[in-house]
Amino acid sequence: MDYKDYNDYELLEYIYEGNEEANNIIIKKYEPLIIKIATKMLPFCKNNGLEKSDLVQEGMIGLNHAIDRYQEMENILFYTYARKCIERKIMSVVIASNRNKNKILNESISYDDEDNFLNKFIKSDDYNPEETVLNIELEENLKNKIINVLTDFEEQVFSLLITGFTYKEISEMLDKDQKSIDNAIQRIKAKIKKVI
């Protein structure tokens, strides 16, 4: 079997029938697209431990998601759906890694210190664990309410923006001009005002 001999829909039919070779063929067919998207996103993985192979692996997971869920889609080309799934999966890992890149260093505790952070933390009257948990829950609830009113594109822009990416980086990641990003951010702000 060669992927040039089959279109995506024929391959998908074979995959849904349990043909492992068809699954390998569609992966081979979409691998260049995954590598292209991973290469484009690599510059945004500044010092966060992600390598191109990690992004390619996430892209493969996105492709598998597209294959599994495509039957539920109507009036959309498989290529379009697969590309969107691949981009979202890679983007989500880049966003998550940039959010957490300094987490280990920021949360580390020196045990050499006599009066270390942990002791201050436990003895502190200012710290209220219940209040901290409630604040985290409120923040997550608010973020979910905001995301529910955004379009797919606005949600991508919002996620990248709150992670700390600049307009320029967001425009490069999403292949849109900065004006489109700015317009999306203005719409997001208006929707946030309504939610709040």
Image: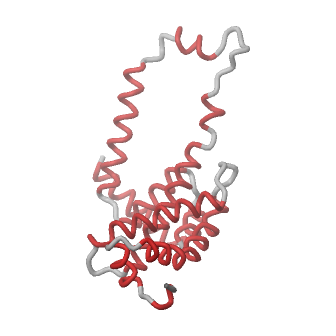
Compared with 41, 32 (above or below) is below
Q: Residue at x 62, y 34 (%)?
A: 104
Could you tell me how many numbered marks the image carries? 0
Q: Position of residue 32 (x, y in %)?
A: 59, 77
Residue positioned 46% across, 64% down in the render: 62
Left or right, 111 with respect to 14, comes to right
Give the farthest residue toward the bottom: 5
Whether 180 is drawn above or below 2: the answer is above
In this view of the protein, which residue sits in the foreground, 112 or 71? 71
**From the viewer's perspective, is 25 left or right of 69?**
right
Whether residue 101 is visible, yes or no, is: yes
Across and down, in percent, residue 134 comes to 35, 28
Looking at the image, residue 100 lies above or below residue 129? below
141 to the left or right of 125: left
In the foreground, 106 or 71: 71
Residue sitting at 66 percent across and 57 percent down?
51
| Residue 55: image location, x then y, percent | 59, 60
